[in-house]
Image (cartoon, grey):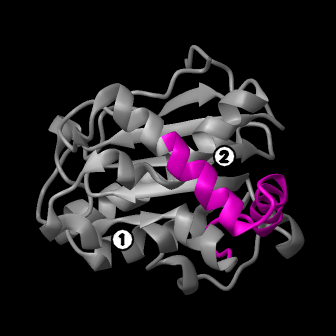
Amino acid sequence: MRKEPLVTGEIYHIYNRGVDKRDIFLDKDDIGRFVESILEFNKIEVVGSLRNKLKTKVETVPKALSEKPLVSIIGFCLNPNHFHFILRQLEDGGISKFMQKLLAGYTYYFNAKNSRTGSLLQGTFKSHHVYDDNYFRKLVGYTNYNDKVHEIPENKKHLILAGSLEYMDGNFSIITKSEGEEILKIFKGNKGFEKHCKEIVSIIRKERGRLSLLEEDNLPDSA
């Protein structure tokens, strides 16, 4: 049982890393598969593997219901050995259902591709309630620019995908469009958004230095 209940309508910082701090994305195909899974599994409908999805022609859930999202996505960053999301829960149990499908499906894919067995991630996903506006603003910068918090080796920089890219060009595909547009209103456009996020990253670097991927990626302070 999760100590912190995930309440519908509330916003949460969701994150996890590879077991033993191992990389969970080894090439661009892995990133592509994870993104494909994010988009496919964010639905009320129970979905099997992506490979088997098209084999059935029987629609057991009405289309309008099955395509209703479990969560909306406000921020994200995929780093070589860990990930971050800012999610708003839209349905009861939505975050847990989404993350279970996403991580189980991706682990199955990764293990099959790399001839391995066992857990890929460090236990169940971690969650932290975003309980006030000040903390929310910090997390928007921290999460969407999380790769800038780390000292990432040059040969792994192609294994980064961050929400900052979508906020800067306004082309929301992983970020939920309505959430993204609201964030840009709050910061008065993408330039204001960029300025805010870089300020948050600068503060974190001054407090901690630039973390390697093997160091714990602790949350920013709420105050």
As for residue 210 lying within the magenta part, the answer is no
In the image, what residue occupies the spot 46% across and 44% down? Answer: 201
State the extent of the magenta-drawn residues as a range: 172-200
Quadrant where the N terminus sits is top right
Circle 1 sits on which residue?
31
Give the answer, above or below, for where 170 lies relative to 123: below
SS for callout 1: helix
Q: Residue at x 42, y 67 (%)?
A: 161
Inspect the magenta stretch and tell me whether residue 188 lies in it: yes
Label pair 1/2, CB-CB below 8 angstroms? no
Q: Residue at x 70, y 77 (%)?
A: 170
Find residue 6 and name its label.
none
Q: Residue 189, how many percent across, how many down?
A: 76, 66
> Residue 168: where, in percent of width, then height?
61, 72
Amino acid on which disc 2 is placed: Leu
Counting other residues with Cα less than 10 Å from the Cα at mark 2, is it few (<14), some (14-19), or many (20 or more)?
many
Q: Write the residue at 78% across / 58% down.
A: 179
| Label 1 to label 2: alpha-carbon separation | 19 Å
Depth check, front residue: 5 or 189:
189
Secondary structure under the numbered disc 2 in the rendered image: strand
Please state the horizontal and vertical placement of residue 12, each as a whole percent of the image.
Answer: 65, 35
Q: Main secondary structure of the magenta part?
A: helix
Q: Relative to residue 107, is residue 180 drawn left or right?
A: right
Q: Which mark is residue 87?
A: 2
Counting labels gives 2
Residue 156 visible, this orientation: yes
Image coords of residue 140 (percent x, y): 62, 46
- Closer to the chain start, of discs 1 and 2, is 1
Q: Amino acid at mark 1?
A: Ile
**Is 186 positioned to the left or the right of 16 in the image?**
right
